[in-house]
Image: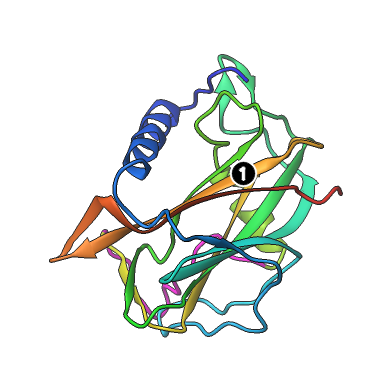
Amino acid sequence: MPRLSSPLALTSLAAAAALTLAGCGGGAGADVEIGTEPPASFTQPSWALPIAPVGTWLTSLQNESVRVDVYQVAIAQSPEDSSWADGDTPLFVAGDPVVTLQYILTNVGETDVMLQSGEAQTRFNYAGSDLVSIPAEHHLSDLVESQGVSTASIDHSIEPSSPEHEMPLAAGESSSWATAYWYDTGVEASLNVEVPQFADGEWDYDNHVIDAFTEFELQAP
């Protein structure tokens, strides 16, 4: 796949590459279990939007601290062109299929886990892709939310907006968010999940609460 560009693409791809290198450092990549079934229920923290799994459960990744469940919400026709392009050619055009994935992160440990903006860092990709990851289509938030899921985890009617958004997740609590991506038919998908450690008021991108990878198949529309 060719390298993509957009008004923010070069910055976004550079950041993603940096995250890839960070994920190769210290952290919690060992002893990760891939789940075989979804949890029965979730408990949200006071700062989060309500959590309701939507669609088909695909997979989960879990270590001693956190678990991340992945649901395929829907495959739908995009109402707009992709915001990412190879030169003047967008990754997809209006009417092409996009897939929405919902992520639900749960603290399965015994101590609080701090999350940036209430979320983990995720990199979704397809087998054979030349990209660091398939870019998230944040401009399709109206489509995503029409499918019954939110693109953000934080309830801003309760939690005022702030540039830091260092959100604590207590033991047993979960947060949820969803993202739309270009849909590639019949290609195996992969996901990398990272949560950097937070200590002494700062993020440590060399060490992680979790840094895990898994492969799975999307459900055909």
Which quadrant does the N terminus fall into?
Answer: top right
Q: Is residue 162 magenta?
A: yes
Q: Position of residue 183 (x, y in %)?
A: 73, 39
Give the total of numbered labels: 1
| Residue 94 seen by the camera | yes
Q: Nearer the viewer, residue 96 or 190?
A: 190
Q: Nearer the viewer, residue 53 or 27?
A: 27
Horizontal side of residue 54 vs 121, given as left or right: right
Q: Using the rendered view, name the quadrant where residue 50 is placed.
A: bottom right
| Residue 160 seen by the camera | no
Magenta region, mostly helix, strand or loop?
Answer: loop
Q: Using the rendered view, name the quadrant where residue 151 is placed.
A: bottom right
Q: Position of residue 109 (x, y in %)?
A: 40, 78
The stretch of residues the image draws in magenta is 149-163
Identify residue for label 1.
190
Going 40% across and 26% down the picture, which residue do you hit?
Answer: 10
Going 57% across and 47% down the picture, which residue do you hit?
Answer: 191
Residue 194 vertical placement versus 18 (above, below)? below
Residue 69 vertical placement versus 40 (above, below)? above
Q: Is residue 109 magenta?
A: no
Going 43% across and 30% down the picture, which residue do you hit?
Answer: 13
Question: Mark 1: which amino acid?
Answer: Ser
Horizontal side of residue 216 vs 28, given as left or right: right
In the rendered image, the residue lying farthest to the top is 87
